[in-house]
Amino acid sequence: MGVLDECHYHVGVENGVNVEVGGERGAIEDAVRVLLLGLGEDINREGLLKTPLRVAEALRDGTRGYHQNVKGIVSGALFPESGLESTVGSAGGAGGLVIVRDLDLFSYCESCLLPFQVKCHVGYVPSGQRVVGLSKLSRVAEVFAKRLQDPQRLADEICAALQHSIKPTGVAVVLQCSHICFPNSQSDLNNHQGYVRLSVISGSGAFDDEKAGIWTDFLGLLRFRGLTADATRSLEKSWCPSRTICKTPPASDPSLLAAVSSILYALGEDPLREDLVETPARFVNWLMNFKNSNADTKLNGFIRSSMRESSLTMAPSYICSELNLPFWSQCEHHLLPFHGVVHVGYYSSGRAISSVGKSLLQSVVQFYGFKLQVQERLTRQVAEAASSILGEDVIVVVEASHTCMISRGIEKMGSSTATIAVLGRFSTDSTARAKFLQIIPSSA
Amino acid sequence: MGVLDECHYHVGVENGVNVEVGGERGAIEDAVRVLLLGLGEDINREGLLKTPLRVAEALRDGTRGYHQNVKGIVSGALFPESGLESTVGSAGGAGGLVIVRDLDLFSYCESCLLPFQVKCHVGYVPSGQRVVGLSKLSRVAEVFAKRLQDPQRLADEICAALQHSIKPTGVAVVLQCSHICFPNSQSDLNNHQGYVRLSVISGSGAFDDEKAGIWTDFLGLLRFRGLTADATRSLEKSWCPSRTICKTPPASDPSLLAAVSSILYALGEDPLREDLVETPARFVNWLMNFKNSNADTKLNGFIRSSMRESSLTMAPSYICSELNLPFWSQCEHHLLPFHGVVHVGYYSSGRAISSVGKSLLQSVVQFYGFKLQVQERLTRQVAEAASSILGEDVIVVVEASHTCMISRGIEKMGSSTATIAVLGRFSTDSTARAKFLQIIPSSA
């Protein structure tokens, strides 16, 4: 598998990136301003003023692995540990397989610059009567995750670095990766899969042969009983949705492409590296989904001209709901995606909204989603638009996962956010609110 | 609830600790050496040589909140955000409740110095047409978690700090805390609960009244539908097992108590603060569970004299197992607990071991657990001892959660480790290993 090739490892992985060349933070900030202008945004708007700085800091932090050295991590954390004394077999510092399971990492996709999540499992077979501190397996994995990556390369680099620095009988790495996948605006949002998932493996030494019994032990202890080594080897490089959905990205504004290239360069990467050549085009193509269309007026006009569903003489008295309307958006503070679902409640005299009304509501959600946003504003905008369709008594709950909450310093993997807007009767009647909140299905 | 008392907040929370007095790292290292000697350990043993340094670094990192200032975190992250324009109600920057759910934190228990895990949920009601960056809610919570804490105080401090720095209509905090609970050596290990759990709430402003409708909204969005505000308020301070199990810790060696006091002082705490007065006694009492008894010989003698279960003339041919034998141990690299289960497999001619053999096996596991350990060594030692009870063909799997993997820099909350030792036939027969691994129940 080539992962044991120490020379390649040294030159290609540890020192192959031009970390010294990586420009000042200013270069990234300038590039982000170009991209914001390309999105039709006012870069002096208060919410965006510090966005270039935040993006630069997040990217620096997310690719800090380029400046980290594995040797410094492992050295000093190798401990003498006996094997078996007078018995046949393997244990402790001589052959006793050690596995650390379920390490949560995130990395940046080199094809599209979006973060992807990784559930990482690392194992090794100690030799030479010594073991490594367990946390070092996590720290080494982290070094390579914090770079622009592809899942298979990430697995191979973690494997090679551990083999090289610990020099054990063998190393095995299994990664289960999830890449956010945005819908095409055209495709059916409701059937859209939010993530592309890919599992990859890498092994060296005793794990070089994927048919070896030690792989069975490793996978057995991971409880991937249905998962064979064969099934997990990644054969194609194009797991990134931006590669599969659109093989050749359409031509983009050259100044935007140059801006992304300058970001790659500032991070210490070579924008001409084969796997990065089309990254600027893919990133720009994706980012422009969120172009500010300034079409508020158009949408409002459409809503006002559509039939009001609740134009009734008597006060409507039943709470109706439209739940789990999916949305996709881009955090204006970090230029990172957030996505989730919108729940809308309203009063009706017993009749739910028509399918026209329902699809109009989904259009509203999609319209306010696809731009630079903050969740609080999205919630208010959807509530105001919904009220012009559904009447003045409206409650809107938005539940979302924010990439910026997992992929920067705070790294709160399982966190989610909820925001609420209450109009008319819902703002004064806490029993009505409680009734509506009860019917929202648990997202767990 | 007093959490809005800004003066108290300023003096007591932000600046009440003597951060300037906090001594050099050397003081903590010296104290750890005293404790290691008290455990009967050789402080020059290679595995322990850097333990004082590691403990000092982990404690510094785990209490770095003493040196952090909330104001610097929130200022610059308040963004203008409109409320509703022409409708009655609350939304966006004027009254639209915002919640961040499921933030994983850990903190240090001020009663016993062990880390405890926290699932943190924070909400606030924006006012003045401005909202705070979502990640700041997490960062502020982190500042107070990274101190010696008690759950209710932690909730109150997070709440007060957010109220003070954001000045919103109200702030609500719900914490679900889990404290590791070690068994008494005497008690029944199999019925032992591994964690004490406690939920606490704190509210200010609009959340001051725990009967207010806004609390219903908040808890509704947290989906704690069975959990009322009443049920979550902590009435007693003694959630820490070291307080409930043993109200007055027994007298300990004064030099060990002085060592722990000097650690508290070096971290910037006042060892004479009411809630800390008995902490050294509790910590020392707990730590001495792991005193090195040098009783290896005694145990081995016991095992050798016990009846060998598999003294048969024909080769035994069935794989038998003893699964989920619980153990509790102390990581010798970080002086932090790790615990989990041991699974033992062996060959038999069809007869499982007697209840005497089973309880002997549990004694072996408990004996090798209760000391400064590394998981790899524990696995080997249990395998060697098991083989003197069960015959030469033995397989041992240890699955564990390491506090040191969650409570220091790497903070990998969901991670777990697995180690394996294979003796005799199990070391050469991968089918036998696979058979045994299949019967281990999933620990999910």
Image: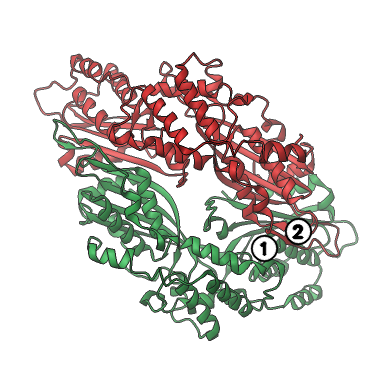
Chain colours: A red, B green
Kindly state the secondary structure of the residue where label 2 is placed. Answer: strand
Indicate left or right for A204 with B414 as reference: right
In the current view of this chain or complex, which residue is farthest to the right? B313
Name the residue at 38% across, 59% down.
Answer: B144
Amino acid type, callout 1: Val
Q: Which mark is residue B374?
A: 1
In the current view of this chain or complex, which residue is farthest to the left? A313
* Quadrant containing the C terminus of chain A in the rendered view: top left
Q: Position of residue B443 (x, y in %)?
A: 59, 51
Give the distance between the C-alpha atoms of the residues marked 2 and 1, in whole angstroms: 12 Å
Q: Position of residue B18 (x, y in %)?
A: 38, 71
Q: Position of residue A221 (x, y in %)?
A: 67, 47
Q: Quadrant of residue B333?
A: bottom right
Indicate left or right for A291 with B36 as reference: left
Nearest the eye: A397 or A444: A397
Nearest the eye: B6 or B191: B6
Q: Residues within 10 Å of mark 1 (few under 14, many from 20)?
A: many
Nearest the eye: A353 or A370: A370
* Quadrant containing the N terminus of chain A in the rendered view: top right
On what subunit does the disc labeled 2 rest? A
Kindly state the secondary structure of the residue where label 1 is placed. Answer: loop
Q: Which mark is residue A130?
A: 2
User: Is residue B348 among what the camera can see?
Assistant: no
Indicate left or right for B61 with B8 as reference: right
Name the residue at 67% across, 33% down.
Answer: A232
